[in-house]
Amino acid sequence: MSAAGKQEINFKAFNDSAISQPLIKHMYTADPSAHVFDGRIYIYLSHDIDAGNAFDDLGSHFAMEDYHVISMDTPGSQATDHGRALHVNDVPWAAKQMWAPDAQEKDGRYYLFFPAKDHDGIFRIGVAVSDQPTGPFIPQPQPIENSFSIDPAVFKDDDGSYYMYFGGIWGGQLQRWRSGSFNAAEPQSPFAHLPANDEPALCAKVAKLTNDLFSFAEEPTDVLIIDEHGKPLLQGDTERRFFEASWMHKYNGKYYFSYSTGDTHFICYAIGDNPYGPFTYAGRVLNPVLGWTSHHSIIMFNGEWYLFYHDSSLSEGVTHLRSIKVAKMEYDGHGMIQTLEPYNG
Ligand code: FUB
C-alpha cells in the first residue's frame, strides 16, 4: 500500500514490453498531452533540449524552443514523430521557454495551446491553429488576453464546452499573480510571493473558452482542492497541494482533476461534480519518477485507461532531458485510481 493508503500496481508488465520504454528515443520529449482524434492517438509534448543554461529553481534550464507532435495507432504501437509543429521564432509575442502544451479539436480544426515567456519575461498562454492534428500550427499574433502562468490543459466536456486549466508555481510564476496583476517586486526567488505554509494553497485556474477557442469566456477562477473534511489543502501540505501540470478527465460522470505536487514529485488527483470543483483530494496516480519534474495526461482508448507521463531514464537522470512513456491505469470499484509505481517490481 502507498502512503495514501491506495493499492499500488507496478509497471513490471510494461517494463517487460515495448510500451514501458520511451515512446521515441531520437529526441528528448516531456509533458505529454495525449488525445484521441479520429481513432488515433496524438501526443502534444515539450521538446527538451540542452541549451546550456545553468540549473535554477526557476527552471531556466528548461529552454525549449519548439513543439513536435507524436502519433500512435494504439498505446503499444510504434510512435511517429511528425516533425516540428511550431517554433518560438514563429510566435510574435513569445521570446523563450516553450513549456508544456496541450491541444484540442473543434469543427475539424486543431488548436495548440502553449505557454511561453513573452519579451518581458512573463509567462503567457498562446493558441495556434492547424487543419491537421499534426500541424504545422499558425499562431495567433497575441497571447490569450489576461492569460498568465503555464501548463494549459484544455478539456472538452460532453456538452461541447471547452475549459482551460492552467498554472504552476515557482518557475511557472503563478504566485506572482495573487493580486490579479503581475507582481514584479523583488525578490525573483521562486519561494517569494507564496502563501505561508498554514494558509490555503495556491490553486490552479480554470476558465471556459469562447466559441473560437481564442479567448477566456470568463475570468479564471480557482480550482479548489479540499481534504476529507472539506477544508482547502494548505500550502505546507506539499505531498498533496497543487504545484503544476493540470489535467482533467471524466470517469463515470465525475470530474477528475490531476496534477503534479512538484517538489514532492507525485501525480495526485481530486474528484469533483462539475468542471469548476471544488475537488476532493483522492490520492496518487503516479509515484515519483527519475528526474525532478512529473507531468502526465490520462486518456481512454478502446475502453482502457492510459497514463502518459515522462521520466529522465533515457538521459540517465538529467532532469531537463526527459522522455515520454505510457502505462495502463486501473480504477477500483469505487472509482479510485490505483497508484502506479514506476520502477519497482
Ligand atoms: O517542461 C517544463 C515544465 O516542467 C512544465 O511546464 C512543467 O509541468 C514541468 O514538467
Image (cartoon, helix red, strand yellow):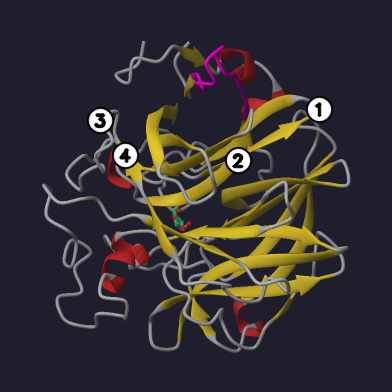
Q: Quick check: is the Cβ at mark 3 less than 8 Å away from ligand 1?
A: no
Q: Separation of disc 3 and disc 4 at Cα?
A: 8 Å
SS class, disc 1: loop
Number of the label disc, if any, that sits on residue 266:
none
- On whether residue 123 falls in the magenta region, the answer is no
Query: Which residue is at a point 28% across and 36% down the rendered structure image?
Result: 230
Which residue lies under the disc numbered 3?
229
SS class, disc 2: strand
**Principal secondary structure, stretch drawn in magenta:** loop
| Residue 14: % across, % down | 63, 19
Which of these two is toward me, 73 or 312? 73
Query: Which residue is at a point 68% across and 66% down the rendered structure image?
Result: 112
**Which residue type does callout 3 highlight?**
His
SS class, disc 4: strand
- On whether residue 328 falls in the magenta region, the answer is yes
What span is colored magenta in the figure?
327-338
Which residue lies under the disc numbered 1?
302
| Residue 1: % across, % down | 36, 10
Number of the label disc, if any, that sits on residue 249:
2
The reply to whether the C-beta atoms of the residues labelled 2 and 1 are less than 8 Å apart is no
**Which residue type does callout 1 highlight?**
Asn
**Which residue type does callout 4 highlight?**
Ile
